[in-house]
Amino acid sequence: MESIDINQALTKLPELLEKAFAGEEILITKNNQQQIKISPCPLPSQRPPLFGCDRGKIALSDDFDEPLDDFQEYM
């Protein structure tokens, strides 16, 4: 983790941002006290697509709509 004074950071801001994009954390100090921390944000995890995600996992039999034998007396 790099630590740099605010006066130096102002002149090197593009360079510091490139380091942060690369994954490095940078501390910016003022009067030898930590004031600001620049760090990369974690990338959001991608969720699986909602539609079609169970394709090939579920199968229905051909007689799915046919009445069940157990309920013949009620029909």
Image (tube, helix red, strand yellow):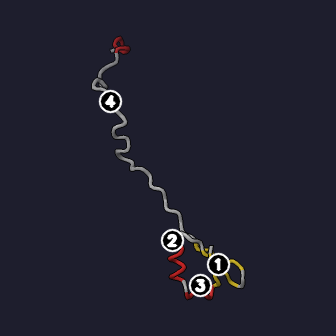
The numbered mark at residue 3 is: 1
Say if 50 sits above or below 67 in the image. Answer: below
What residue does disc 2 label? 22
Callout 1: 10 Å neighbours few (<14), some, many (20+)? some
Q: Earlier along the polypeptide chain: callout 3 or callout 2?
A: 3
**Contact between labelled residues 3 and 4, with CB atoms less than 8 Å apart:** no
Q: Amino acid at mark 3?
A: Ala
Q: Residue at 29% across / 21% down in the picture?
A: 66
Q: In the visual, does 3 lie left or right of 70? A: right
Q: Earlier along the polypeptide chain: callout 4 or callout 2?
A: 2
Callout 2: 10 Å neighbours few (<14), some, many (20+)? few
Q: CA distance from mark 2 to mark 1?
A: 16 Å
Q: Nearer the viewer, residue 59 or 29?
A: 29
Dot 3: element = helix
Q: In the visual, does 73 lie left or right of 28? A: left
What residue does disc 3 label? 9
Q: Earlier along the polypeptide chain: callout 3 or callout 1?
A: 1
- Picture coordinates of residue 33, whole percent (x, y): 72, 80
Dot 1: element = strand
Please state which of the two labelled residues, at mark 3 or mark 2, is closer to the viewer: 2
- Picture coordinates of residue 48, whole percent (x, y): 42, 50
What residue does disc 4 label? 60
Hey, which residue is sitting farthest right in the picture? 32
Q: CA distance from mark 4 to mark 3?
A: 64 Å
Q: Earlier along the polypeptide chain: callout 2 or callout 1?
A: 1
Q: Amino acid at mark 4?
A: Leu
Q: Residue at 44% across / 55% down in the picture?
A: 46
Q: Nearer the viewer, residue 57 or 70?
A: 57
Say if 34 sits above or below 73 in the image. Answer: below
